[in-house]
Image (cartoon, helix red, strand yellow):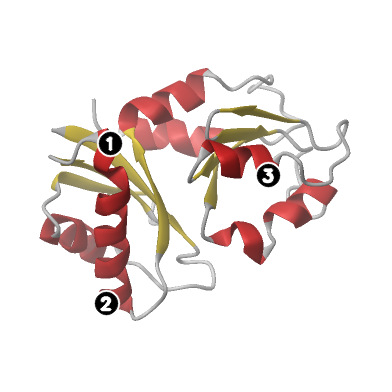
Amino acid sequence: MTSWIALLRGVNVGGATVRNAELREIVTGIGGTDVVPVLASGNVVFDHPTERADAAALRARLEAALGRHYDYDAHLLLVAREAVEEAIGGFPFAADDTARQPWVIFCDTAQTAASLIDEPRDDDLDPVARVGAVVYWNPPKGRSTDTPFAKAVARRTWRERTTTRNLRTLVKILATRP
């Protein structure tokens, strides 16, 4: 059994309105167990017998189930719990810097992450780093929508291949289950 975290993209902020009880039912319907939606923002922790090597097939099944239920073009990133733990532990900037916003961008592949960090940015304003399929981004607080990199990340090009979470949100997601 693998512990998974599904990070839905574009829900409850102008996309589909996803209710936690419904999300739990949908994930259970594709064979998920111990399903725990987190924070009413498109995050769900669950177990599933699918191995990490077969994550793409499980992701496609969950996207299809969400799309049918909510009648929208569902996109999510499916990340093994251990990979989220590694992403949190690997944050390369000062996570406690109150003047900055600690973001983790999960990408569908390492190639996507490599392409993403090639986007225009001001290195002082938009420090980024990459490890595998994860991009770390640490803009000044209050500037996560108007910096050069923020504008690049928001482009349609990345919508189906990335999703962004605050480091503190990821810690809360992991705390939902031991």
Residue 86 percent coordinates (x, y):
44, 22
Looking at the image, can residue 145 be seen?
no
Q: Cα distance, mark 3 to mark 1?
A: 23 Å
Which numbered disc, 1 or 2, marks the residue that appears first in the sequence?
1
* Nearer to us in this view, 8 or 109: 109
Image position of 169 with respect to 30: above or below:
above
Residue appearing at x 23%, y 25% in the figure? 178
Name the residue type under label 2. Answer: Arg
Residue 81 percent coordinates (x, y):
32, 31
Which residue is denoted by mark 1 in the rendering? 53
Secondary structure type for disc 3 = helix
Looking at the image, can residue 178 be seen?
yes
Which residue is denoted by mark 2 in the rendering? 68
Residue appearing at x 64%, y 61% in the figure? 157
Relative placement, left or right, of 94 versus 121 is: left
Secondary structure type for disc 1 = helix
Which residue is denoted by mark 3 in the rendering? 116
Pointer 1: residues within 10 angstroms few (<14), some, or many (20+)?
few
* Nearer to us in this view, 72 or 93: 72
Name the residue type under label 1. Answer: Ala
Callouts 1 and 2 close, C-beta under 8 Å:
no
